[in-house]
Image (cartoon, helix red, strand yellow):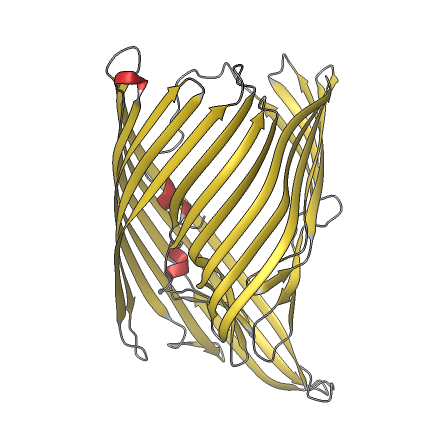
Amino acid sequence: MYNATGSIDSSIAANNTSTSFFNKYGVNLNYTHKYDSSGKKALSFDMDYIHYSSGANQSFLNSTYAAGGSMKSSQQISAQLPSHISIYAAKTDYTQVLAGKVKMEAGLKSSYVTSDNEANYFNVISGVSSIDYNNTNHFVYKENINAAYLNFNKEFHRFSLQAGLRAENTNGNGHQLGNAYKPDSAFIRQYTSLFPIAFVSYKLDSAGDNLLNLSYGRRIDRPNYQDLNPFVFILDKFTAFVGNPFLRPQFSNDFKVAYTHKNIFTISAQYIHTADVQIETIEQSGSVFISRTGNIGKWDYLVLSVNSTLHPAKWWTINTYADLFNYQVYSGQLYTGYIQTKSPYFFAQVNNQYTLGKGWSAEASGFYCSPRQQAQFNKIAFGQFNLGLQKKFWNNQAYVKLAARDIFNTNTSTGFITNIPNVIAHYANQFHNQAVILSFTYSFGKQSQTEKRKVGSADSEAGRAGN
């Protein structure tokens, strides 16, 4: 810590440890009935139960020293952060081909989620622990979502058309239990929304080698359950992550036009407008910087991208995806007033696969993202380069693979944080991302031909559990 003249005022040594755990289990029941062998009429049903248990045990020891090196004070804190999430979900889908080869799809879904989270903090003095009521809390969140959808598909001549509508009703309530210092508090949130989709595909030639696609869709992204929990997760003496029970869902309107040639090259233009965009925000409270997910007005995003699969030689395949031009604008209210950021940037990802013969193959891949501004964060460019070598044997039932990840150690998170009054903030995170991995895989028997269900009825809810 430096004073106004730039001289050392004091120093702080922090010894912080954290051990965490995560468990998940669940059960799924699904049923499918096809009314005839043609499959033109079918009914499916799914029921899911998923339970998550997670938590962390933390210990913080902060020692403050004077400029001369003598100890001024010492602070010790311990914490226990258990969390439990239970998800119950059921859905049914019905498909039928109507007159004129119009395919109709309809369905219903209902889900119920409970999220029970505790943050128990203790001040430790001379080995004796006492509850820190300022940071301790117990938060329970319950949510019920009911949805119905209707979708139609039709193909004729060179056109392929799709139109649909989904309706969702959300009922959520949160309860923060009080303690000796804080009273109980609660909130109820109810809303119903409609989500239309439309898709048009046109074959520009009779062979179908050139396709033009137009699409529109409206979607909702609800907060993760942990983001709604008003817990305080201490990182160090000056930094904490805090939940936000007032976090609202974000709604997006997505427009896209794309041209595809022989399924080997696609170029597309896309525009997305998002209201109440959810994003990480940074606020200063005294000497502590608080990170939380917040709603910042709106986000407008424009991107021109290309996707290609090339074969320069029989033994060489190149898969490429690139955002040739990205332009995004964040605008809205922040803690200290209005914020507006505008930023163009570039992103590219390339994967090279080499077939070397006699069971040998190799791979070289990587990505690059140019500097960009994302709300409060000015992010510096980063990327990654990987290499791999593989050998198959025993009639391709086994293989050995040697892979090296992030060879040049360039996948970092570095930049500046803006819109904090009277503060210049720079951050640099160096991940333990570099690795050399040697693996052996052996496949027993033949692959099962049984049809596998990719998702159940709780896929979207499970994605919000944060693990």
Residue at screen point 49% across, 39% down: 256
Picture coordinates of residue 54 (x, y %)?
41, 53
Picture coordinates of residue 152 (x, y %)?
31, 28
Query: Which of the 4 quarters of the picture holds residue 72?
Result: bottom right
Q: Nearer the viewer, residue 174 or 214?
A: 214
State which quarter of the image contains the N terminus: bottom right
Residue 429 visible somewhere in the drawing: no
Picture coordinates of residue 143 (x, y %)?
27, 53
Residue at screen point 40% across, 66% down: 231
Residue at screen point 32% across, 35% down: 164
Instruction: Please give left or right for residue 87 compared with residue 238 in the image.
Output: left
Picture coordinates of residue 204 (x, y %)?
53, 22
Query: Which of the 4 quarters of the picture holds residue 189?
Result: bottom left
Answer above or below: position of 149 versus 152.
Answer: below
Instruction: Please give left or right for residue 304 compared with residue 49 in the image.
Output: right
Residue at screen point 26% across, 67% down: 186
